Image: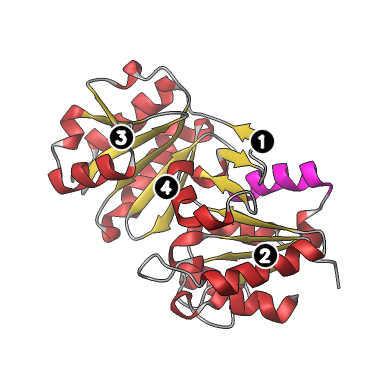
Amino acid sequence: MSEIKMIASDLDSTFFNDQKHYHKTHFADVLDKITLQGGYFVVATGRDVDSVDPFFKSFAGRYDLVADNGAVVRTADGEILQMVGLDVVDVTDIMAVVNEMPFKPLHGAVFTGAETAFMLQSQARLNLLHKARMKKVHNNLQFIDFVDQIHEPILKVTVTYETEKTQEFIDLARVRLGSRAHVTTSGYGSVDIVAPNINKANGLQVLASHYGLKLNENLVAFGDGLNDAEMLNAAAYPFAMINGDESLKALYPAAVDDNNHDGVLKTVDTLL
């Protein structure tokens, strides 16, 4: 059996329960165990950095981070190992695809920058409740008229549709963008578009190389959605959540419980 040195987990519907909570005492115990054997715990998520750190205030400096589906990689001590953005022209094409669809997104696209989050003024009017929610999540949210007003790396574009319409948008976006971007979904209608060849597995490989580890020998990974597919495929010990996407559950062993009953932490207990 290969030695476990890295544990990576998605957050929403995986590490978090449906109320976005987790068992902090149990997590502290897992962190102690993996640290004692010279290993690392990695939060691997489609969320951006600013929406992750508040959940883990009491564990600051004890977890590594792969954010924005791999666009940003940060070590536990705060070193940024990777930050990869989309070209403005490609983001403009993404919005052209959004405008071409025969149906509107549920709310305006969010452009996650290196320092700031952005929304188009025209898109923000689609759903005023979501606009207010985004202002709370992103303290530095800015509203712009055109994409080319963004003058910092665009790490991720997020668009949300009704679930049954998501695949149509994904298919068209993939055709239009080709190799210029990676289009993925975590399910629930949310579509994330990041730079080409960027995904959670890529981000974890950056971390593994930094620490002298190998994903196919040292990584345990947990996920529930299609944006976890590359990560699970790369891991020595992949686990699909019981509550996760059927395609993942068909390929990988199931975690010992679902996200509402500490499935990730309970599974780790059986491994360490």
Q: Main secondary structure of the magenta part?
A: helix
* Residue at the spot of label 3: 97
**Residue of label 4:** 51
Q: Secondary structure at mark 4?
A: helix
Query: The magenta stretch spans which residues?
Result: 199-212
Q: Residue 250 occupies which quadrant of the picture?
A: bottom right
Q: Amino acid at mark 1?
A: Glu
Q: For numbered disc 3, what is the local secondary structure?
A: helix
Location of the C terminus (image quadrant): bottom right
Lower sequence index among marks 4 and 1: 4
Label 3 CA crowd tier, 10 Å (few <14, some 14–19, many 20+): some
Read off the residue under disc 1.
79
Q: How is the image coloured?
A: secondary structure
In three-dimensional space, the C-alpha distance between marks 2 and 1, rounded to whole angstroms, equals 20 Å
Horizontal and vertical percent position of residue 72: 57, 38
3 vs 2, front mark: 2
Look at the numbered discs 4 and 2 and tell me whether their residues touch, using CB distance below 8 Å: no
| Number of other residues with Cα within 10 Å of mark 4, as a class: few under 14, some 14 to 19, many 20 or more | few
The amino acid at mark 4 is Ser
Q: Amino acid at mark 3?
A: Val
User: Mark 2 or mark 3, which is nearer the start of the sequence?
Assistant: 2
The residue that appears at 50% across and 53% down in the rendered structure is 57
> Does 119 appear above or below 172?
above
Label 4 – label 1 distance at C-alpha: 18 Å
The residue singled out by tag 2 in the image is 31
Residue 20 percent location from the top left of the image:
39, 65
Amino acid type shown at disc 2: Leu
**Label 1: which secondary element:** loop
